[in-house]
Amino acid sequence: MRRVAAVSAGPFLISSALSVWLVWSWRSSVSGYVAVYANLAAMLFAGMVGFAGLGLIVWERTRRLGVAVLVSAMWLYVSFVGVTNALYRLDLVPWKHERMVSILPDAGKGFYIYFKPGTSEAEIRKFSDQVIFDPPSSRGQDLKAGITSFVRVASSGNQETIAIGLRPDLTPMQRQEIRSRIEKESIVQQVTDARLNCR
């Protein structure tokens, strides 16, 4: 009887410890985006342990251990979800009220580049390499002077869009120089200071 209890308690204690670690990882994440990885890890670990339990159940000699492992897998995920939901409802999560930050530039802080319909991926890549980025070096490929970010925006129909952020200390003349360099490219249809509402 003691041996059976030990066999049952082992997987349960291990899954409980793993659940505690995952909850701690989830709560101490820097943001809700990062916390998602803890949720995925809990699902992954529970799934792996569950499959191991099913494999052990097949053999008569390890059937008790298999049942214990399978129950432990369910406990791992249920305890993780239960505790994280409780912490979230009780406002015990540091990142709960964080504002969502857009990676797209705000109006006046960058440019939205709309390509002509039908522009190919190869043409956009060539444009980016020549107009947005400096030539590649041993350190990689940096953005050209004055440009701080580069984002591919979800396409609308068959029209592709790129958003770039600009340094806030650029003079109007420097901003215009960057804009002119972009607008002279034949594949560019329009350059705007803000995202068009219709896109």
Image (cartoon, grey):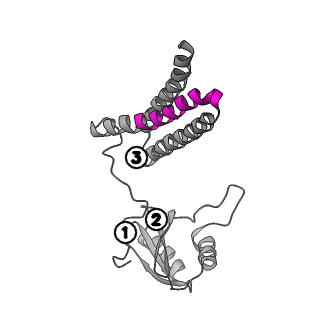
Which residue is outermost to the top?
A: 2
Mark seen at residue 166: 2
Pointer 1 with pointer 3, Cβ within 8 A: no
Mark 3 — residue? 32
Q: Which of pointers 1 and 3 lies earlier in the amino acid sequence?
A: 3
Q: Amino acid at mark 2?
A: Leu
Residue 61 % position (x, y): 65, 27
Mark seen at residue 108: 1
Q: Which residues are magenta?
A: 60-79
Residue 182 % position (x, y): 52, 78
Q: Which of pointers 1 and 2 lies earlier in the amino acid sequence?
A: 1
Q: Residue at x 42, y 36 (%)?
A: 80
- Label 1 neighbour load within 10 Å: few <14, some 14-19, many 20+: few
Q: Is residue 25 visible?
A: no
Number of callouts: 3
Residue 24 % position (x, y): 44, 32
- Observer-side mark, 2 or 3, equals 3
- Label 3 neighbour load within 10 Å: few <14, some 14-19, many 20+: some
Taking 169 as reference, is 6 above or below it?
Answer: above
Residue 30 part of the magenta segment: no
Residue 149 % position (x, y): 50, 62
Q: Quadrant of residue 87?
A: top left
Distance CA(mark 2)–CA(mark 3): 27 Å
Residues 171 and 45: in front is: 45
Distance CA(mark 1)–CA(mark 2): 9 Å
- Label 2 neighbour load within 10 Å: few <14, some 14-19, many 20+: many
Pointer 1 with pointer 2, Cβ within 8 A: no
Q: Is residue 90 visible?
A: yes
